[in-house]
Image (spheres, grey):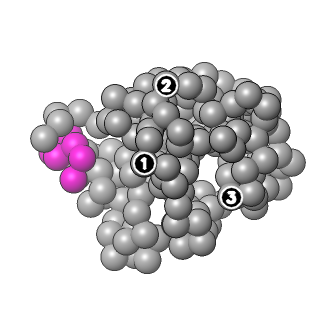
């Protein structure tokens, strides 16, 4: 079992239904190193609403909560429809309450500067292949629409193939 916290932890439908707590998710991936870090990883009400919606309405998407102190956005989403990791679209998102959708990382300040680090970690886990994710900021509703309707920027990992 790892002795430190990863850059991201996967949230599952069991989390969305309340059967699994975030503290349990952290303890599962990091063991004793997770103790005392739960509050840092806690989801705000808007993040919780977004996560629950993704996990209950878009089951082809897997959702990772990124370490809030890592500057890798709020979440990484990966479309798991393909069996081939290099064909899986991915989005690194930073939620901004009431904000319009911005693709490419604009509007996030420093919140997405380590997005590549989160993607490299997912690539090392065999979840995605090499390539750049779609960087997106905006209100949870417009970000959800982007990830489920697949309206990514041209030439990005999220472009339907």
Label 3 vs 1, first from the N-terminus: 1
Cα–Cα span, label 3 and label 2: 21 Å
Report, in whole angstroms, how far the alpha carbon at label 2 lies from the one at label 1: 15 Å
Does the CB distance between marks 3 and 1 fall below 8 Å?
Answer: no
Specify few, some or many for label 1: CA neighbours under 10 Å numbering under 14, 14-19, or 20 or more.
Answer: few
Left or right, 101 with reference to 11: right
Secondary structure type for disc 1? loop
Label drawn at residue 148: 3
Point 49% across, 34% down: residue: 86
Place of residue 136 in the rendered image (x, y in percent of width and height, measured from the top left): 72, 39
Residue 95 inside the magenta-drawn segment: no
Nearer the observer: mark 3 or 1; the answer is: 1
- Where is residue 156 drawn, in percent x and y? 69, 30
- Give the answer, above or below, for where 159 lies relative to 109: below
**What residue is pinned by disc 2?**
130
Rendered residue at 22%/43% (across/down): 30
Q: On residue 83, which mark appears? A: 1
Quadrant holding the N terminus: top left
Q: Which of marks 2 and 1 is nearer the N terminus?
A: 1
Quarter-of-image position of residue 25: bottom left
Of tags 2 and 1, the one toward the viewer is 1
Q: In the displayed structure, would residue 49 be above or below residue 118? A: below
Stretch in magenta? 28-33
Residue 134 horizontal side relative to residue 73, left or right:
right
Query: Mark 2: few, some, or many residues within 10 Å (few <14, many ≥20)?
Result: some
Chief secondary structure of the magenta span?
A: helix
Question: Counting other residues with Cα less than 10 Å from the Cα at mark 3, is it few (<14), some (14-19), or many (20 or more)?
Answer: some
* Quadrant holding the C terminus: top right
Q: How far apart are marks 3 and 1 (CA)?
A: 18 Å
């Amino acid at each position: 079992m790892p002795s430190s916290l990863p850059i991201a932890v996967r949230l599952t439908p069991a989390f969305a239904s309340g059967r699994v707590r975030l503290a349990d998710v952290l303890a599962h991936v990091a063991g004793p190193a997770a103790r005392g870090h739960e509050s840092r990883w806690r989801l705000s009400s808007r993040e919780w609403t977004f996560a629950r919606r993704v996990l209950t309405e878009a089951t082809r998407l897997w959702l990772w909560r990124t370490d809030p102190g890592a500057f890798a956005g709020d979440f990484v989403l990966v479309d798991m429809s393909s069996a081939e990791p290099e064909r899986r679209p991915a989005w690194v998102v930073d939620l901004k309450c009431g904000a319009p959708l911005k693709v490419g990382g604009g509007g996030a300040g420093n919140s997405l500067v380590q997005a590549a680090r989160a993607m490299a970690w997912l690539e090392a886990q065999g979840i995605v292949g090499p390539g750049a994710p779609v960087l997106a900021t905006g209100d949870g509703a417009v970000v959800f629409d982007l990830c489920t309707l697949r309206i990514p920027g041209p030439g990005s990992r999220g472009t339907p193939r």
